[in-house]
Amino acid sequence: MTQQEFQEKYGGEIIDGWLVFGKNKGDVYLHNNQLTSLPENIKFENEGSVYLSYNQLTSLPENIKFENEGSVNLHNNKLTSLPENIKFENKGYVDLYNNQLTKIPVGLEKRKNLYWR
């Protein structure tokens, strides 16, 4: 699905080539949508949490950015790996529980409030 198709279906705003979820002050709810992938250049800057749980995601785009204030919920997907350069810059926890991950990128295991096993 292209950025524009994703935006038309789920919201966000395309700014300088990025699909940005951040204009709202609350949470971003993209959970339980049977999503199998996310578009390239997607960024979360909202003041709340990001809910991407209960989908069918097997991977994340190389250039995804989590800069939201709350938690990132990616549990109950089918993730087998994460991009090596992924950075969770959100302030809340990161929940990767109940995926198919056998390892996480170097340095990510040092993050506080990371749940992945």
Image (cartoon, rainbow, N blue to C red):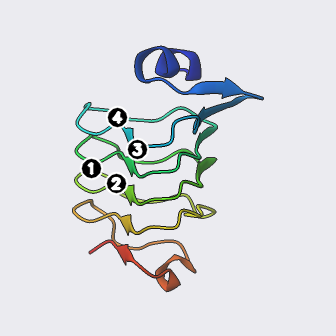
Foreground label between 4 and 2: 2
Disc 2 crowd rating (10 Å Cα; few below 14, some 14-19, many 20+) is: many
Please, what secondary structure does the residue beneath circle 4 have? loop
In-front residue for pair 106/49: 49
Q: Which residue is mark 3?
A: 27
The percent coordinates of residue 97 (x first, y second) are 26, 65
Query: Distance from label 3 to label 4 (Cα)?
Result: 21 Å
Work out whether mark 2 precedes mark 3 in sequence or the reverse, and give the earlier one. 3
Query: Distance from label 1 to label 4 (Cα)?
Result: 9 Å
Please, what secondary structure does the residue beneath circle 3 have? loop
Q: Can you name the residue that lies furthest to the front here?
A: 25
At x 41%, y 17%, the residue is: 9
At x 35%, y 36%, the residue is: 30
Foreground label between 1 and 2: 2
Disc 3 crowd rating (10 Å Cα; few below 14, some 14-19, many 20+) is: some
Q: Which residue is mark 2?
A: 74
Residue type, label 3: Asp
Taking the image as shown, residue 72 lies to the left or right of residue 24, namely left
Please, what secondary structure does the residue beneath circle 2 have? loop
Q: Which residue is mark 4?
A: 36
Q: Which residue is mark 1?
A: 77
Query: Distance from label 1 to label 3 (Cα)?
Result: 19 Å
The percent coordinates of residue 66 (x first, y second) are 55, 54
Disc 1 crowd rating (10 Å Cα; few below 14, some 14-19, many 20+) is: many
**Looking at the rendered structure, which numbered label has been put on residue 102?**
none
Taking the image as shown, residue 72 lies to the left or right of residue 42, namely left
Tell me if I can see residue 1 in this picture.
no
Residue type, label 4: Thr
Quarter of the image holding residue 40? top right
Residue type, label 1: Asn
Disc 4 crowd rating (10 Å Cα; few below 14, some 14-19, many 20+) is: some
State the quadrant of the C terminus. bottom left
